Image (cartoon, helix red, strand yellow):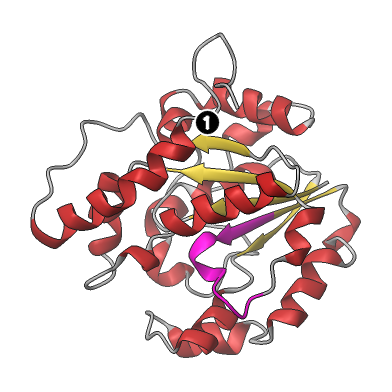
């Protein structure tokens, strides 16, 4: 199985990659289109030069890696993707051959966390609109993508990862709930800037507290992302015993 997990920044995406790697039967890859995205947009992200040197900038070569032999001949291939990387010029025909999952988080939390690491973010930087557009694209192809909210995972990772595995047709294993401290060999080179907290972890962080209070540009950014978030939240796996939300 090839699982494409579509997230935005500051959204539990690295912890989820670690959880799937901890299964033992999953190869993983970390944001394989990042260098291609930077090459095509010209954006000056932290560690831009290092990122560009560490990955193919030709998106066709990236697709070949995602659809070719699974690394280490593992049964499953977990691909951590950032939805905002899927700009015009990055092919998306390959996504039809993946089992697609969307990892969402409340925009207020994303706006607060991302703006602390990246100056003056705009809506295109945080992936919500791109997630909704890609979800609609996959539905039009006849898929029923899975949506899961990181807030629900942090509140009860055991239950939510069990439900995610069931939705994917994967056998559940409690090995997904913990990982070694210090990061993973497949971390992108940008981990030095972004992954400090998860490198210090050995499992999922506790449940989140109240939403952060935002004002000014951060509040406007969160508000602009809310319609896309609410659309996907409405079809997310449910944390209740009733199972998943209607889709």
Name the residue: 60% across, 29% down: 161
Residue 153 in percent (x, y) is at 48, 31
Dividing the picture into quadrants, the one containing residue 47 is bottom left
Name the residue: 66% across, 27% down: 174
Figure check: 145 above or below 96: above
Q: Is residue 204 visible?
A: no
Residue 141 in percent (x, y) is at 74, 49
Residue 235 in percent (x, y) is at 53, 30
Q: Nearer the viewer, residue 141 or 56?
A: 141
Name the residue: 43% across, 31% down: 154
Seen from this angle, which residue lies furthest top? 241
Q: Which residue is mark 1?
A: 236
Considering the numbered disc 1 on the image, is that residue within a helix, a strand or a loop? Answer: loop
Task: Look at the image and say whether residue 164 sits in the magenta stretch.
Answer: no
Figure check: 163 above or below 41: above
Q: How many marks?
A: 1
Name the residue: 44% across, 89% down: 42
Q: Nearer the viewer, residue 181 or 141?
A: 141
In the rendered image, the quadrant that contains the C terminus is: top right
Q: Is residue 63 visible?
A: yes
> Which range of residues does the magenta coloring cover?
79-90
Q: Nearer the viewer, residue 203 or 76?
A: 76
Task: Look at the image and say whether residue 84 sits in the magenta stretch.
Answer: yes
Dividing the picture into quadrants, the one containing residue 73 is bottom right
């Amino acid at each position: 199985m090839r699982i494409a997990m579509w997230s935005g920044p500051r959204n539990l995406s690295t912890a989820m990659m670690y959880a799937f790697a901890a299964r033992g039967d999953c190869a993983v890859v970390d944001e394989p289109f990042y260098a291609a995205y930077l090459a095509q947009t010209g954006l000056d992200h932290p560690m831009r030069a290092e990122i560009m040197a560490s990955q193919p900038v030709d998106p066709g070569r990236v697709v070949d890696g995602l659809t070719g032999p699974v690394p280490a001949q593992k049964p499953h291939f977990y691909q951590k993707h950032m939805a905002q990387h899927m700009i015009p010029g990055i092919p998306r025909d390959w996504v039809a051959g993946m089992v697609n999952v969307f990892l969402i988080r409340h925009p207020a939390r994303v706006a607060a966390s991302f703006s602390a690491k990246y100056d003056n973010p705009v809506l295109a930087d945080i992936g919500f609109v791109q997630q909704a557009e890609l979800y609609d694209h996959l539905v039009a192809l006849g898929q029923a993508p899975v949506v899961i909210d990181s807030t629900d995972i942090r509140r009860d990772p055991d239950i939510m990862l069990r439900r995610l595995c069931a939705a994917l047709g994967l056998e559940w294993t409690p090995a997904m709930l913990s990982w070694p401290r210090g990061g993973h060999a497949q971390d992108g080179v940008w981990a030095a800037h972004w992954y400090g907290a998860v490198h210090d972890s050995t499992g999922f962080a506790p449940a989140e507290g109240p939403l952060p209070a935002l004002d000014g540009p951060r509040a406007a950014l969160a508000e602009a992302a809310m319609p896309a978030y609410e659309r996907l939240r409405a079809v997310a796996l449910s944390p209740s015993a009733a199972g998943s939300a209607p889709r």
